[in-house]
Amino acid sequence: MNVTVALPVAASRKDDFPGLAGNWAYLDTAATAQKPQVVIDAIAKAYGPDYATVHRGVYERSATMTLRFEEARESVARFIGAASASEIVFVRGATEGINLVAQSWGQRLVAGDRILLSALEHHSNIVPWQLLRDRTGIEIDVAPLTVDGRIDVDALEALLTPRTKLVSIAHVSNVLGSVADVARISRAAHAAGALVLVDGCQAAARIVIDVQALGADFYVFSGHKLYGPTGIGVLWGRADLLDSMPPWQGGGAMIETVSFEKTTYAPPPQRFEAGTPHITGVMGLAAAIDYVQAIGIEAISAHEATLVKAARAALSRINSVTLFGPDDSAGILSFAIEGVHPHDIGTILDESGVAIRAGHHCAQPLMNVLGVPATARASFGVYNDLDDVARLAAGVERVTRIFGTGSK
Ligand code: PMP
């Protein structure tokens, strides 16, 4: 391995992450990212000296917390190029964001309407639509993939019909790392009269997001994959769309007036944020966004591209390894070793301190397309370096030695 390759993000970034202490190579960032100390500190501060509720308190501490909470919303809006902070709905994560759209916006669909997904979707962008199908009688279409594992946009376009109301796709595949041509998909969907929801769970920490340039109507992501806390995520929706959508959960904070006869609802985003929000999660998310923006998403993209390229080169030299996904995948590399179950790969790599994920990655339909029950997946983050790639390659070589599949 050529260890003289310069990496766009300094190796010292590793020191920002207490979770990386010890002698291990963490290659499971697509499942969840480690947290920089600044995020942990922001959460501790929000639970400690700054702690108070938001939106309701008449005392200064609460007013300050409310201000910070709403500043965080503005920071998220700037981060993804939203037109206004009122388009940002705080949710538990990408999963909840998609369920919100399915349950609220989905109420306008009727039997015979169609939703178009792709074959590489995470279960969280499949099952909410199936639940909606069970309630309403809509139909679900599935766009196939190109041989290198991208959404086949020509085929997707051919599946659009006048009854297609929504195209819902992953920006970056959590298994293959392939990046969807969202701008083109949006143009085609809109020309057919359909809206576009983008699952940006794997994209938000890896590529620059500009929801307006993408032409999307909804965009969701989770804080914990963006070096932020679990339990917090974002649904962005175009203002006019959110405005037209009914509430999905009832309770405090989402109303204008309540009587036993009639209740009126607050405008978005509050309409969709019933109950006391995840205040400390929002503070942690804001700190995470500050952290990645200080480094620059472009630098993180370039950094991960270098690591994926190095990993592809190293693994492709090993006999019996199959690599999935396109060469230019964003930060994620799935692979298989002939005759070895991915769980065995994961277990043996763990013995040498290399943490990868093995399984179907909540994308069982994609496993069927790939013709495997599971894959081994290495995924990279801002803190990984070429030493981690070397350890991955050495670990995979060890697996092939143990199973007797040998090197090229
Ligand atoms: N979509 C994609 C592409 C994902 O990778 C994930 C998480 N693995 C999700 C959705 C769901 O995210 P969460 O579990 O944080 O809601």
Image: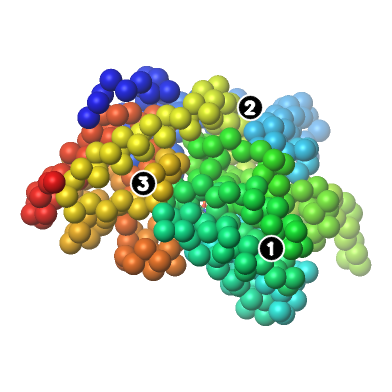
Q: Amino acid at mark 3?
A: Leu
Label 3 or label 2, whichever comes before in sequence order = 2
Q: Kindly report the distance in space between the C-alpha atoms of the residues bearing marks 3 and 2.
A: 41 Å
Secondary structure under tag 3 reads strand
Front label number (1 vs 2): 1
Q: Kindly report the distance in space between the C-alpha atoms of the residues bearing marks 1 and 2.
A: 42 Å
Secondary structure under tag 2 reads loop
Q: Which mark is residue 333?
A: 3
Residue 277 position, x and y percent, is 67, 45
On screen, residue 333 above or below 293:
below
Secondary structure under tag 1 reads strand
Label 1 crowding class (10 Å Cα cut-off): few <14, some 14-19, many 20+? many
Residue labelled with disc 1: 166
Front label number (3 vs 2): 3
Label 2 crowding class (10 Å Cα cut-off): few <14, some 14-19, many 20+? some
Q: Which mark is residue 50?
A: 2
Label 3 or label 1, whichever comes before in sequence order = 1
